Image (cartoon, helix red, strand yellow):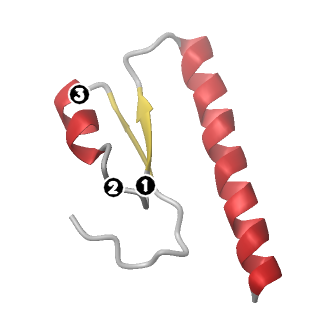
Amino acid sequence: MRIYKKWIPLIVCTFNKDLLSKMSHIDEILLLDTSEIKSEIIAKMRLNLNVIKKYFAEELHNH
């Protein structure tokens, strides 16, 4: 798998544990396990969105 545009955030959401495991080494994507309970998914989604927000804030500051 290739990620062509590094400026576009990519969050992979799946309940497939094998796929999550295979993709865990890719730094350019964020993973979300949808087999978890709703409250955990929401908390992790908020965390992922904050990571993206922080990344873009740093990139704008550096350019």
From the image, state whether disc 2 or disc 1 is nearer to you.
2
Q: Position of residue 53 (x, y in %)?
A: 73, 57
Disc on the earlier residue, 2 or 3: 3
In the image, what residue occupies the spot 78% across and 68% down?
57
In the image, what residue occupies the spot 65% across and 24% down?
43
Q: Quadrant of the N terminus?
A: bottom left
The vertical placement of 12 against 5, above or below, is above
Q: CA distance from mark 2 to mark 3?
A: 16 Å
* CB contact under 8 Å: marks 2 and 1: yes
Q: Position of residue 44 (x, y in %)?
A: 59, 29
Q: Quadrant of the C terminus?
A: bottom right
From the image, state whether disc 2 or disc 3 is nearer to you.
2
Quarter-of-image position of residue 27: bottom left
Mark 2 = which residue? 26
Instruction: Tell me the element at label 1.
Output: loop
Q: Residues within 10 Å of mark 2 (few under 14, many from 20)?
A: few
| Labelled disc at residue 37 | none
Instruction: Tell me the element at label 2.
Output: loop
Mark 1 = which residue? 29
Q: Position of residue 10 (x, y in %)?
A: 46, 57
Kind of residue at badge 2: Ile
Instruction: Tell me the element at label 3.
Output: loop
Q: CA distance from mark 3 to mark 1?
A: 16 Å
Mark 3 = which residue? 16
Disc on the earlier residue, 3 or 1: 3
Q: Residues within 10 Å of mark 1 (few under 14, many from 20)?
A: some
Residue at the bottom extreme of this rendering: 63
- Residue nearer the viewer, 26 or 11: 26
Kind of residue at badge 3: Asn
Quarter-of-image position of residue 60: bottom right
Say whether residue 44 is left or right of residue 57.
Answer: left
Kind of residue at badge 1: Ile
